[in-house]
Image (tube, grey):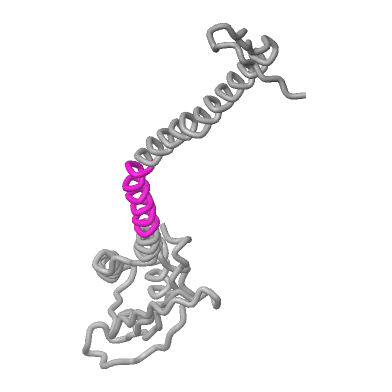
Amino acid sequence: MIRINLLPEEHRARTKTPLKLMLAVSGAVALNASLGAWWAWAAFGVAAGIEGERSVLQIEMDGLAPQVAHNKSLQAESAQYKTREATLAEITQSRIGWTRKLDEFIDVVNRGDEGQRHLVWFDNFDVSQDNDPRRGSFGSIKANGHSGSDQFAQVANFLQDLEESPFASDFQPPGSPEGSESILDAELMPSVVWAFPLSLEFKSPEERP
């Protein structure tokens, strides 16, 4: 049934919103506002904070990148220098100072007590430094020597003096004395000469002093 209120508006009873409905609507509005504020904070506040931290870390990384690259460069250079140092050490270890060696050899030749212990000279002095570690060969010295005495023991004296001298520190001990006697003119000094070979084998680089 339809009711029509014909009273003037100022005499009509005012319609009031129920309290429960108002509370429910207010609660819903507050809840939606809270959810909206939380979402806005999560979407913008947290994201902005994370973006700020990311920016700070990116700046730090950009600042560290040149240092990291420089450090890697230094490590590469260090490895290269270590390789060079090892190569130079190997070369130095296997190298022999021939000026010093020849001086030492000449000293032994000249220390013959004017022929009382030995009187020797050489036609040649051939050095071979062909290293072949697999075969245990590190080079050798070969020379054709002469002893100006009719006593073959002087050849042994020379080889003994040579073995006990600083010259022999880089070589294996010489072999047993051997040679052949050559008779010369009796008017010459010396009149008898022994020809003998000299052969010395190099020690390995690790065995050298």
Say which of 37 and 104 sits in front: 37
Q: Position of residue 14 (x, y in %)?
A: 60, 9
- Residue 83 lies in what quarter of the image? bottom left
Q: Is residue 85 above or below residue 42?
A: below
Is residue 135 left or right of 2 when viewed as pictured? Answer: left
Task: Please tell me which residue is depicted at 37% across the width and 47% down the height of the picture.
Answer: 68
Image coordinates of residue 54 in percent, x first then y, are 43, 38
Please tell me whether the stretch drawn in magenta is mainly helix, strand or loop.
Answer: helix
- Residue 2 covered by magenta stretch: no
Residue at the location (48% across, 35% down)? 47
Q: Please state which of residues 65 and 27 is positioned toward the viewer in this rendering.
A: 27
Q: Is residue 65 magenta?
A: yes
Compared across the picture, whether 18 is left or right of 183 comes to right
User: Could you say where residue 195 lies in the image, as x and y percent from the top left?
Assistant: 37, 86
Q: Which residues are magenta?
A: 61-81
> Residue 146 or 163: which is nearer the viewer?
163
What residue is rendered at 47% in x and 61% in y?
Answer: 206
Query: Is residue 143 visible from the viewing direction of this image?
Result: yes
